[in-house]
Image (cartoon, helix red, strand yellow):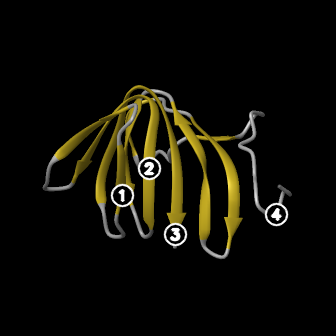
Protein backbone atom coordinates (compact mmCIF):
# COMPACT_ATOMS: atom_id res chain seq x y z
CA UNK A 1 0.00 0.00 0.00
CA UNK A 2 1.09 3.54 -0.59
CA UNK A 3 1.00 6.36 1.91
CA UNK A 4 -2.14 7.63 0.17
CA UNK A 5 -4.07 4.63 1.51
CA UNK A 6 -2.25 3.87 4.72
CA UNK A 7 -0.94 6.16 7.41
CA UNK A 8 0.96 4.92 10.42
CA UNK A 9 0.52 6.58 13.80
CA UNK A 10 3.70 8.44 14.61
CA UNK A 11 5.55 7.39 17.73
CA UNK A 12 7.46 10.67 17.92
CA UNK A 13 7.06 13.55 20.31
CA UNK A 14 3.55 14.68 19.33
CA UNK A 15 2.10 18.10 20.10
CA UNK A 16 1.71 19.02 23.79
CA UNK A 17 -0.62 21.51 25.44
CA UNK A 18 -2.56 22.14 28.64
CA UNK A 19 -6.15 23.26 29.20
CA UNK A 20 -6.56 27.04 29.43
CA UNK A 21 -6.74 28.48 32.95
CA UNK A 22 -10.44 29.35 32.56
CA UNK A 23 -11.28 25.67 31.84
CA UNK A 24 -8.99 24.02 34.41
CA UNK A 25 -10.76 22.69 37.53
CA UNK A 26 -8.02 20.65 39.23
CA UNK A 27 -4.59 19.14 38.74
CA UNK A 28 -2.09 20.01 36.05
CA UNK A 29 -3.05 17.85 33.06
CA UNK A 30 -0.86 17.79 29.98
CA UNK A 31 -2.27 16.66 26.64
CA UNK A 32 -0.19 15.10 23.88
CA UNK A 33 -1.73 14.64 20.44
CA UNK A 34 -0.42 12.63 17.50
CA UNK A 35 -2.54 13.65 14.48
CA UNK A 36 -2.68 11.10 11.68
CA UNK A 37 -5.15 12.91 9.43
CA UNK A 38 -6.30 16.52 9.17
CA UNK A 39 -8.24 17.11 5.96
CA UNK A 40 -11.60 18.63 5.00
CA UNK A 41 -12.98 18.75 8.57
CA UNK A 42 -11.89 15.21 9.45
CA UNK A 43 -9.29 14.74 12.16
CA UNK A 44 -8.02 11.49 13.63
CA UNK A 45 -5.14 10.26 15.68
CA UNK A 46 -4.13 9.45 19.22
CA UNK A 47 -4.44 11.66 22.31
CA UNK A 48 -3.04 11.19 25.81
CA UNK A 49 -3.63 13.16 29.00
CA UNK A 50 -2.08 13.05 32.45
CA UNK A 51 -4.37 13.36 35.52
CA UNK A 52 -6.49 16.44 36.09
CA UNK A 53 -9.99 17.82 35.49
CA UNK A 54 -11.22 20.50 33.10
CA UNK A 55 -14.37 21.81 31.41
CA UNK A 56 -15.22 20.59 27.90
CA UNK A 57 -17.56 21.92 25.21
CA UNK A 58 -18.02 20.08 21.90
CA UNK A 59 -19.05 21.72 18.62
CA UNK A 60 -18.22 18.62 16.58
CA UNK A 61 -18.78 14.85 16.51
CA UNK A 62 -16.05 12.77 18.12
CA UNK A 63 -15.70 8.99 18.21
CA UNK A 64 -13.29 7.80 20.91
CA UNK A 65 -11.78 4.44 21.80
CA UNK A 66 -9.93 4.29 25.11
CA UNK A 67 -6.63 2.41 24.82
CA UNK A 68 -5.45 2.78 28.41
CA UNK A 69 -6.22 4.59 31.61
CA UNK A 70 -9.33 5.70 33.49
CA UNK A 71 -11.36 8.88 32.99
CA UNK A 72 -14.72 10.24 34.10
CA UNK A 73 -16.76 12.29 31.63
CA UNK A 74 -19.67 14.18 33.19
CA UNK A 75 -22.38 16.08 31.32
CA UNK A 76 -23.61 19.34 32.83
CA UNK A 77 -26.86 18.52 34.61
CA UNK A 78 -26.61 14.86 33.58
CA UNK A 79 -24.81 11.62 34.20
CA UNK A 80 -21.13 10.89 34.72
CA UNK A 81 -19.57 8.05 32.73
CA UNK A 82 -16.41 6.18 33.67
CA UNK A 83 -14.36 5.08 30.68
CA UNK A 84 -11.49 2.60 30.66
CA UNK A 85 -9.39 0.63 28.18
CA UNK A 86 -11.62 -1.03 25.59
CA UNK A 87 -14.51 1.44 25.92
CA UNK A 88 -15.76 3.23 22.78
CA UNK A 89 -18.22 6.11 22.64
CA UNK A 90 -19.41 9.10 20.61
CA UNK A 91 -19.58 12.67 21.90
CA UNK A 92 -22.13 14.77 20.02
CA UNK A 93 -22.05 18.48 19.16
CA UNK A 94 -23.44 20.58 22.01
CA UNK A 95 -22.07 18.31 24.76
CA UNK A 96 -20.84 20.38 27.71
CA UNK A 97 -19.41 19.15 30.98
CA UNK A 98 -16.13 17.98 32.46
CA UNK A 99 -13.41 15.47 31.63
CA UNK A 100 -11.47 14.09 34.59
CA UNK A 101 -8.44 11.91 33.99
CA UNK A 102 -8.06 9.69 37.06
CA UNK A 103 -5.21 7.61 35.57
CA UNK A 104 -3.24 8.76 32.51
CA UNK A 105 -5.59 8.09 29.62
CA UNK A 106 -4.82 7.39 25.96
CA UNK A 107 -7.53 7.39 23.29
CA UNK A 108 -7.82 7.03 19.55
CA UNK A 109 -10.19 9.58 18.08
CA UNK A 110 -12.00 10.56 14.91
CA UNK A 111 -13.47 14.07 14.79
CA UNK A 112 -15.87 15.30 12.12
CA UNK A 113 -16.74 18.98 11.97
Q: Is residue 48 left or right of residue 12?
A: left
Q: Say which element carries label 3.
A: strand
Disc 1 vs disc 3: Cβ atoms closer than 8 Å?
Answer: no
Q: Nearer the viewer, mark 2 or mark 4?
A: 4
- Residue highlighted by disc 2: 64
The location of residue 21, given as percent across then percent down, is: 47, 45
The location of residue 9, given as percent across then percent down, is: 71, 43
Q: Residue 4 — which label?
A: 4
Look at 40% across and 63% down and name the residue there: 58
Q: Is residue 30 above or below residue 8?
A: above
- For marks 1 and 3, give the CA distance: 11 Å
Q: Say which element carries label 4.
A: loop
Q: Residue 10 — which label?
A: none
Look at 74% across and 33% down and name the residue there: 11
Q: Is residue 101 above or below residue 98?
A: above
Q: Quadrant of the N terminus?
A: bottom right
- For marks 4 and 1, give the CA distance: 27 Å
Disc 1 vs disc 2: Cβ atoms closer than 8 Å?
Answer: yes
Q: Earlier in the sequence, mark 4 or mark 1?
A: 4
- Residue highlighted by disc 1: 90
- Residue highlighted by disc 3: 112
Look at 13% across and 56% down and name the residue there: 77
Instruction: Characterize the local packing of mark 2: few (<14), some (14-19) or many (20 or more) Cα atoms within 10 angstroms.
Output: many
7 or 18: which is nearer to us?
7
3 or 90: which is nearer to us?
3
Q: Is residue 41 left or right of residue 79?
A: right
Disc 4 vs disc 3: Cβ atoms closer than 8 Å?
Answer: no
Amino acid sequence: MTETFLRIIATGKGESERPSADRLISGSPEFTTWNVEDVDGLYCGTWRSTPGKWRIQYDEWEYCRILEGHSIIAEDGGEAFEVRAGDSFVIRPGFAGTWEVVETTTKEYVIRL
